[in-house]
Amino acid sequence: MAFTQTVGVRRYVFEDLKSLLARASPARSGDQLAGVAAASEEERMAARMALADLPLSHFLQEALVPYEADEVTRLIVDSHDSAAFAPVATLTVGEFRDWLLLHETDGERLSAIAPGITPEMAAGVSKLMRNQDLIAVARKCRVVTRFRNTIGLPGRLSVRLQPNHPTDDPKGIAASIIDGLMYGCGDATIGINPAGDNVGAIVALLRLIDELRERYEIPTQSCVLTHVTNTLRAIEAGAPVDLVFQSIAGSQRANAGFGIDLALLGEARQAALALRRGTVGENLMYFETGQGSALSANAHHGVDQQTMEARAYAVARAFSPLLVNTVVGFIGPEYLYDGKQIIRAGLEDHFCGKLLGVPMGCDICYTNHAEADQDDMDTLLTLFGVAGVNFIMGVPGADDIMLNYQSTAFHDALYLREALGLRPAPEFEGWLQRSGILGTDGRPVETPAGARESASSPLLQLAHTL
């Protein structure tokens, strides 16, 4: 179905929904690389005007990726909840934006409609929204998940402690874990990106974290971010697997590039559930995504990168994850050119994920060849705090020495929690207070100089042990 829009004396024609959404997207280098971006700001505005008048129900009638050829499309269509969709079924995309921004549209209403919203609807409405709008709606969406602690509650900000090491050296990893815990990080997960895929080394890393967790009774969860097939092998080897990690994308072909399909994800989830390691809940999948991943695999089907990213959240939603995060600037400037594009993409991803009922976090990051710097990340970090992000990354010095990119540091979480009055997950906060790391006011406890000489200091006991 073609769409037309006249601006002044010029008439614009968009041949189908795929084209309309792509032309309505804010400018970004990935869409330009794919040849789907608007040719001018006037064309972009014409597309947004046409999109605003489009009935929201049209997204249920026109598939961007063919149903017969793509299991992600089949998942989206077959799992759509028409009863949940009913309250907004008669709205246009523009009216849906207005409805989302209403004061009366609170978190309870947003949670109720989430099963009726498709990724394409979420992506479509996001293209009509300012950054302010994306923040205002996302902060109303609370998606709470549980494994050994509770993540996503109002007034809380969790952190994935990311102690990566270029050779997977246990001492180096342990030192980073200690450092992060002293800053109050680690309630989302203690999650290591391994330098290699050796299953024996992966099992050893899992046991390292688990020994630390059990010895000090830390209410958090561990994860080694390896391929899901390696995690299955680790489970078979008797490893203490808490979370199952996998990178995912928005099309079957892109997921095949990651070596996965929906059936494999389901198998891994069932294997981990059978271990029964959660104490307060059973959310145990951890997914990472990023705009441009489908395009980089030539698996985007001509769809703009932000809409393809939103489709990945439908995959995540199907497996009741504990954590999902967009690694927003990791793929590089070919897809998100500069700080402005990274900031916009991060807010879009967070909004779309939360609207779909997904527990969204973000790796607020960039590569060294992008036109971005740490000031841009500080801006996005602060905006995410206001938007109610579930979790962020905690990387020693904000510089991942294994993956070679720039992220957020342990002290960035301290800044955001203090600036916005946010606290860690409640169970983890209790442990931090019992360990003398945080005071009852939520602020870090200053360690007296004399405590450095005392073996009775909980922090030094931790350091000496490891």
Image (cartoon, rainbow, N blue to C red):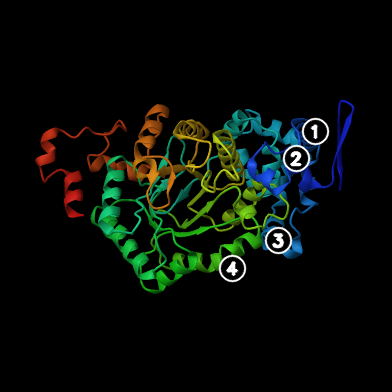
Name the secondary structure under disc 3: helix
Residue under numbered circle 4: 263
Vertical placement of residue 45 versus 431, above or below: above
Name the residue located 80 percent from the left edge and 39 percent from the top edge.
54
**Distance Cα–Cα, label 3 vs label 2:** 25 Å
Query: Tag 2: residue type?
Result: Arg
Residue displayed at 61% across by 65% down? 256
Marks 3 and 4: CB-CB under 8 Å?
Answer: no
Nearer the camera: disc 3 or disc 1: 1
Q: Name the N-terminal-most of marks 3 and 2.
A: 2
Query: Which residue is the site of mark 1?
Result: 46
Q: CA–CA distance between discs 2 and 1?
A: 9 Å
Disc sitting over residue 23 in the figure:
2
10 Å neighbourhood of mark 4: few (<14), some, or many (≥20)? few
- Residue ranking furthest to the front: 369
For this view, does 414 lie left or right of residue 127?
left
**Marks 3 and 4, the one that precedes in the sequence:** 3
Query: Would you say the residues marked 4 and 2 are in contact, meaning their CB atoms lie under 8 Å apart?
Result: no
Mark 2 lies on a secondary structure that is helix
**Rendered image: mark on residue 74:** 3
Element type at mark 1: helix
Give the mark nearest the N terminus, 2 or 1.
2
